[in-house]
Amino acid sequence: MNLSMFNIVLLEPEIPHNAGAAGRLALATGSSLHLVKPLGFSLEDKYVRRTGLDYWQDVDLHVWESYPELEEAMQGRQMWLLSTKASKSPWTADFRPGDCLVFGRETKGLPGELIERAGDHALKIPMVPGGTRSLNLSTAVAIVLYEAVRQQAPEW
């Protein structure tokens, strides 16, 4: 596995369009996309085409059987976990190339024990109180990924 700009991790994603949008973001930033099973959709060609992901073959895609398997493979890389339950903003994070940006399922987010274990590496996208309870997964990926890229490649 080569060192990408960043590693986008979707833990148990449920909606193929969000995974497709994350794949497009990975391509646009020189990042990798990691999907952790179980997936709520199939990666078979007919399903991928159905969701309009004609560029999917160009995505640096890695599929993992479990989160512990991913963690073991990513040893030495910083894991940033995104959750509405965190308190620290991505604007305060010190992102480095190769870091993992970890996002949870669309309907449940990340498990509480992972967020707790992340400590200061659990991040929350700031939102107006009472405005909405969460953002679309692919929107959240874009916000955090481009903050990380901005820190590493400000000339973009």
Image (cartoon, grey):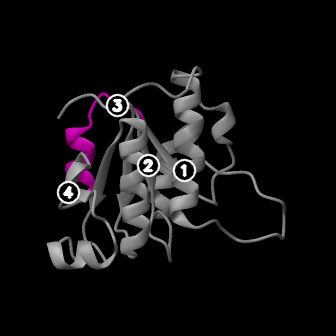
Asked if the residue at tag 4 contacts the one at tag 3, i.e. Cβ–Cβ closer than 8 Å, the answer is no
Q: Amino acid at mark 2?
A: Leu
Kindly state the secondary structure of the residue where label 3 is placed. Answer: loop
Separation of disc 3 and disc 4 at Cα? 16 Å
Question: Is residue 60 in the magenta section?
Answer: no
Depth check: give the residue in front, 113 or 151.
151
Within 10 Å of the Cα at label 4, are there few (<14), some (14-19), or many (20+) other Cα atoms? some
Q: Amino acid at mark 4?
A: Trp
Q: Which residues are magenta?
A: 67-78
| Of pointers 1 and 2, the one earlier in the residue sequence | 2
Q: Find the distance from the CA under tag 1 to the CA under tag 3.
A: 20 Å
Residue position marked by numbered label 1 in the rendering:
142
Q: Is residue 13 left or right of residue 3?
A: right
Q: Is residue 113 above or below residue 33?
A: below
Q: Find residue 25 and name its label.
A: 2
Seen from the viewer's position, the closer of residues 44 and 85 is: 44
Mark closest to the chain's N terminus, 3 or 4: 4
Pointer 1 with pointer 2, Cβ within 8 A: yes
Report the residue marked by disc 4. Answer: 64
Q: Say if 40 sits above or below 5 in the image.
A: below
Residue at the (67%, 51%) spot, across then down: 125
Q: Quadrant of the N terminus?
A: top left
Q: Earlier in the sequence, mark 3 or mark 2?
A: 2
